[in-house]
Image: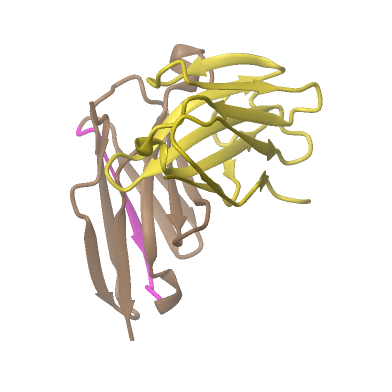
Amino acid sequence: KAGVTQTPRYLIKTRGQQVTLSCSPISGHRSVSWYQQTPGQGLQFLFEYFSETQRNKGNFPGRFSGRQFSNSRSEMNVSTLELGDSALYLCASSLGIGGGSTDTQYFGPGTRLTVL
Amino acid sequence: DQQVKQNSPSLSVQEGRISILNCDYTNSMFDYFLWYKKYPAEGPTFLISISSIKDKNEDGRFTVFLNKSAKHLSLHIVPSQPGDSAVYFCAASAFGALNSGYALNFGKGTSLLVTP
């Protein structure tokens, strides 16, 4: 079974631009979560989508948004990029049916975003 | 606020010996705990998990212990191997308790070095 895939793997943008990152979950997984990893803050939860609906949201500004499609693929968008948005953006997928040992989140390789 | 804490940023262990990685949490609503292993520029890889209704879970060389009264969990790796050298993240979620979808709360990681 193929793992979680994320595209692109690397991205360089300038301040003020916007960016869209894509995530394809493991086949059969309906929950997709997004995380930001930075050296100072570690791994922080952005949001989770399940069946095309945002089910949970972390403490990030409205510039960070996402969506999920009917095939469970997800995109996240960051508008008006700031230097501090430079980070590794990770996507994770799971069945999303109820938590616990049968519903572990599996991560993709991440997209490294650099904002100049 | 950091709800999951890994107070040891690094740990060095000799090959063949036991590695013990520790994690503390503050939110009593957490009901599911996981350990992930991460190499640079890659996404976290799931290692082992434990539900709050258990106090121990084993998978090969990896054992996770949960002490709910102390809000503490630990990961034991026996015997340690050089290939285990990586950053280990502790994570916790409250999926069942809050029924609000996934939001993994991560510690900042412990860098394990296993020397030959």
Q: Nearer the viewer, residue B60 or A105?
A: A105
Tell me if residue B1 is in the magenta stretch.
no
Question: What residue sits 45% from the left and 65% below the top?
Answer: B61
The picture places residue B52, in percent across and down from the top left corner, at 40, 30
Visible in this render: residue B46?
no
Q: Nearer the viewer, residue B11 or A7?
A: A7
Question: What residue sits 80% from the left and 21% below the top?
Answer: A70
Please identify which colour was used for chain B in the image: brown
Left or right: A116, with A52 as reference point: left
Q: A33 above or below B34?
A: above
Q: Which residues are magenta?
A: B70-81
Residue placed farthest to the bottom in the image?
B116
Which color scheme did the rendering employ for the protein? by chain
Q: B82 above or below B26?
A: below
The picture places residue B82, in percent across and down from the top left corner, at 40, 78
Please identify which colour was used for chain A in the image: yellow
Quadrant of the frame with the N terminus of chain B: top left
Residue A98, image quadrant: top right
Quadrant of the frame with the C terminus of chain B: bottom left
Left or right: B3, with B104 as reference point: left
Q: A83 above or below A9?
A: above
Visible in this render: residue B21?
yes
Tell me if residue B78 is in the magenta stretch.
yes
Question: What residue sits 65% from the left and 27% below the top?
Answer: A31
The picture places residue B12, in percent across and down from the top left corner, at 24, 71
Left or right: B62, with A93 as reference point: left
Question: What residue sits 47% from the left and 40% below the top?
Answer: A14
